[in-house]
């Protein structure tokens, strides 16, 4: 299957501290790919590196033929990569509609895109004029995802989207991720809660000390539950 | 248009109508003060775009005001230009200075940005003192009354006439108020507010933060320069005092008092400061003490500025 995004032996550091050590990863077109690993393994840094928010010291990141690791951070989303960071990172003083508008403006998308996005998150339609800082945690997560989807990305990066959410919200987010897969969107998902994402994932990569230790089909994981325990310490 | 938008439109329209009506009822003295307040409120609105909406805490905006002031004043005084081209020269000077300073200073953030803008403004100020042959330094230039005429198709407005001066100041104020009103509701305005909230978030959403901030700085500089150029032609004085640090701090104070990131806040803050000083100086020689107490009370009861606190507590729709 064709790769939507390829990380080819990338090194990343925060100052003197190297976090990613030759990390390689392939996100296939239309798949949901989950990154699992302990805290500090480098999962979030990998997403930040893709978005250009952390400099890539060696290796390269390719989006099909385009070497995005050479782009400025603000140019990366324009290539069709949506990013939902950990903690949602909304503009809390702006309304729901204004947050979405900021997402729409990036790639010059209009009313049709907004309607499609609101179709995925109907609850936001009722809250368009509400300040985003006053939304519940689940609604904020939906808004963060909706804002990223306003770019009409073909690659979506989600960093711990289920963090702090109640089960009904987690189920809703899973449904949205599954619906996006149907539309051909490739999703790279960072999660701590294995049980929350396995039902929707196609493949899983285990990240340890900034390296990709193993990438397996999710069926393989179901037949070998010890694998999760080995890399993540739960399961 | 939304209900909030209609309310804002109505309020801003009412403020402009009130200012228009005041020209016919105010005594000469207060009309003179209000003319000055409106011009300086334009300066504050320009500053508010950079500070209130974009989050750029500049301590060098006196430089942009003075660029407009000198751009218009020097061309009238030394080259004999008429008001329109001189005003244009003022705007151009402000835009060029803002672009150059913005290009350099926006490579820094926070305290470093404050210091860099302050230093550039000091260089500009010292420049006005150094080139005394042209500027006459602190003493400044008095523009000839005969040159302060605004030529319009079929009419000539004498800007030394108090009523004409008031209406010209109001015209400039109204134009900038409408411009800011529309700008902050535009996509660009929303992007600036979002940049103020969090630059990295905007970068990861695909925004060139530097380019947006530079554009905000240039627009802000041109508005401040418009105020400076208008000040020169309306009040006929061009002096280096307007380039001093005091005139970088004053717009910050006006905006903070009136309410940062509110469209009417700069007018409210400028008006408040002018009248507190005016009234206090009539009561006591220790008027700065009274001004200080008044400022403390405002900060205590209106922590987000007058308009900002009104918006937060009572009128959530206020722009």
Image (tube, coloured by chain):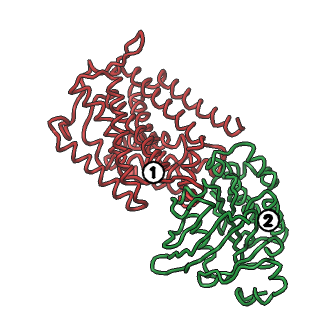
Chain colours: A green, B red
Looking at the image, which residue is at 53% across and 58% down? B199
Tag 2 and tag 1, C-beta contact below 8 Å: no
Looking at the picture, how far across and down is residue A30, in whole percent? 76, 63
Q: Does residue B195 lie above or below B8 as drawn?
A: below
The reply, left or right, for residue A174 in relation to residue B282 is right
Q: Secondary structure at mark 2?
A: helix
Looking at the picture, how far across and down is residue B36, in whole percent? 39, 33
The reply, left or right, for residue B71 in relation to residue A125 is left
* Residue B34 image-quadrant placement: top left
Between the residue at mark 2 and the residue at mark 1, the CA separation in whole angstroms equals 53 Å
- Rendered image: mark on residue B294: 1
Residue B287 seen in the figure: no
Residue carrying label 2: A173
Residue A93 seen in the figure: yes
Write down the chain letter for disc 2: A
Viewport quadrant of the C terminus of chain B: top right
Report the mark closest to the observer, 2 or 1. 2
Q: How many marks?
A: 2
Between A134 and A79, the one lying in front of the other is A79
Between A141 and B13, the one lying in front of the other is A141
Looking at the image, which residue is at 40% across and 50% down? B290
Q: Does residue A173 lie above or below B131 as drawn?
A: below
Looking at the picture, how far across and down is residue A16, in whole percent? 45, 80
Q: Secondary structure at mark 1?
A: helix
Between B106 and A227, the one lying in front of the other is A227
- Rendered image: mark on residue A150: none
Q: Residue furthest left?
A: B133
Q: Does residue B252 lie above or below A59 as drawn?
A: above
Write down the chain letter for disc 1: B
């Amino acid at each position: 299957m064709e790769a939507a995004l390829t990380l080819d032996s990338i090194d990343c550091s925060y100052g003197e501290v190297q976090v990613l050590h030759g990390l390689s990863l392939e996100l296939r077109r239309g798949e949901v790919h989950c990154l699992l690993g302990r805290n500090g393994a480098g999962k979030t840094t990998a997403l930040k590196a893709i978005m250009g928010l952390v400099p890539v010291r060696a290796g390269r990141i390719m989006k099909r033929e385009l070497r995005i690791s050479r782009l400025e951070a603000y140019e990366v989303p324009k290539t069709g990569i949506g990013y939902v960071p950990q903690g949602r990172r909304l503009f809390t003083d702006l309304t729901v509609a204004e947050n979405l508008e900021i997402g729409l403006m990036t790639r010059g998308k209009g009313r049709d895109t907004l309607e499609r996005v609101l179709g995925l998150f109907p609850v936001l339609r009722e809250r368009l004029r509400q300040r985003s800082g006053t939304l519940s945690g689940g609604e904020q997560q939906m808004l963060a995802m909706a804002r990223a989807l306003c770019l009409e990305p073909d690659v979506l990066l989600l960093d711990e989207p289920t963090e702090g959410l109640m089960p009904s919200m987690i189920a809703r987010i899973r449904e949205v991720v599954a619906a996006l897969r149907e539309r051909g969107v490739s999703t790279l998902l960072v999660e701590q809660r294995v049980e929350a994402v396995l039902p929707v994932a196609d493949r899983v990569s285990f990240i340890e000390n900034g390296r990709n230790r193993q990438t397996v089909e999710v069926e393989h994981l179901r037949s070998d539950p010890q694998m999760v325990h080995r890399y993540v310490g739960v399961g | 248009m939304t209900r909030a938008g209609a309310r804002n439109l109505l309020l801003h329209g009412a403020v402009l109508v009130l200012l228009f009506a005041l020209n016919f009822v105010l005594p000469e003295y207060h009309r003179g003060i209000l003319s000055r307040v409106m011009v300086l409120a334009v300066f504050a609105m320009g500053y508010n775009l950079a500070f209130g909406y974009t989050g750029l805490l500049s301590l060098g905006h006196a430089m942009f005001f003075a660029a407009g002031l000198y751009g218009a004043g020097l061309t009238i005084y030394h080259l004999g230009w008429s008001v329109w081209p001189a005003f244009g020269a003022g705007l151009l000077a402000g835009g060029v200075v803002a672009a150059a300073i913005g290009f350099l200073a926006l490579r820094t953030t926070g305290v470093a940005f404050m210091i860099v803008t302050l230093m550039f403004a000091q260089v500009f100020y010292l420049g006005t003192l150094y080139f005394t042959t042209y500027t006459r330094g602190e003493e400044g230039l008095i523009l000839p009354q005969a040159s302060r005429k605004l030529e319009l198709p079929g009419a000539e407005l004498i800007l030394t006439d108090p009523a004409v001066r008031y209406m010209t100041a109001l015209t400039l104020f109204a134009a900038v108020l409408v411009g800011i009103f529309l700008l902050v509701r535009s996509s660009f305005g929303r992007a600036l507010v979002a940049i103020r909230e969090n630059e990295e978030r905007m970068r990861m959403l695909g925004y060139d933060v530097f380019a947006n901030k530079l554009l905000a700085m240039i627009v802000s500089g041109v508005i401040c320069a418009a105020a400076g150029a208008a000040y020169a032609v309306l009040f006929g004085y061009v002096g280096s005092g307007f380039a001093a640090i005091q005139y970088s701090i004053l717009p910050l104070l006006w905006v903070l008092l009136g309410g940062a990131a509110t469209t009417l806040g700069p007018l409210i803050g400028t008006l408040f400061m002018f009248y507190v000083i005016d009234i206090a100086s009539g009561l006591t020689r220790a008027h700065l003490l009274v001004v200080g107490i008044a400022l403390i009370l405002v900060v205590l009861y209106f922590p987000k500025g007058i308009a900002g606190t009104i918006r937060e507590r009572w009128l959530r729709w206020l722009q």
